[in-house]
Image (cartoon, helix red, strand yellow):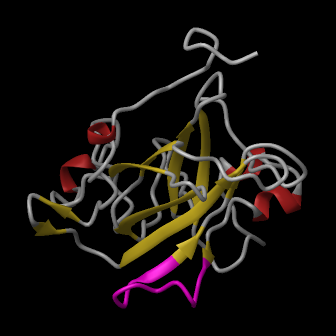
Amino acid sequence: MIPSPFCTIGPFYLKPLIDGLDDLTTVEGRQARGQKILLAGRIVEEGARPVFNAVLEIWQPDANGIFRHPLDPRSAQADPNFSGWGRTRTDQDGLYQFRTILPGSSREDDGVSRCPHINLMVLAIGLTRRLVTTVFFNDSADGVDDPVLSCVSDPRARRRLFAVRDQNFDADGISAYCFDIVLRGDNETPFFLD
């Protein structure tokens, strides 16, 4: 059976709705404050099959840990040259990348400090709902106290939520971090309900 359009699961995005939104380091030509980084990785299905044309969105705090959003009580102090939101798509090999700023530690409404992190959402053909995960930035997963990370009890799964500094993937002198996403299987990335 050949799937017809009504049998396939979307989303389907036009290229102009995606391209050009993967660089969060400037707003209207003005440079964001903080350490620029490249966050890159690969999305694969079970069996290490690359996922082509998946859409990824990220949202994150600035270098001082402030979200540019009204729900962050410190939003008035957020870097005006950093939007904190971006979108990209995977290529035929399942590869994606964002140019962004290394996030600072943020605080919850109750004053709880969060490990530096980037929230990430995946949409792809075949998924019936969006998948949401969090990318953490710390030299080690051990000893990190974060309310979201504490929802993952398996230590191996917790480690899969940390970006890995990639010494061989620096571009233009920018620190690079690798975060691969496995949609299903033994090494599945932990996803959270939103």
Q: Which corner quadrant holds the N terminus? A: top right
Location of residue 14 (image quadrant):
top left
Is 166 magenta? The answer is: yes
Whether the magenta-drawn stretch holds residue 162 is answered as no
In the image, residue 42 above or below residue 88 = below
Q: Main secondary structure of the magenta part?
A: loop
Q: Is residue 48 left or right of residue 137?
A: right
Residue 25 x, y percent position in the rendering: 26, 66
Identified at 66% across, 66% down, the residue is 162
Residue visible at 68% across and 53% down in the picture: 50
Name of the residue lying farthest toward the front: 1
- 25 left or right of 181? left
Magenta region, residue range: 165-176
Identify which residue is drawn at 34% across, 87% down: 172
Q: Nearer the viewer, residue 123 or 61?
A: 123
Quadrant of the image occupied by residue 177: bottom right
Vertical placement of residue 88 versus 39, above or below: above
Residue 190, horizontal then vertical, whole percent: 75, 47
Residue 129 horizontal/vertical position (percent) = 62, 24
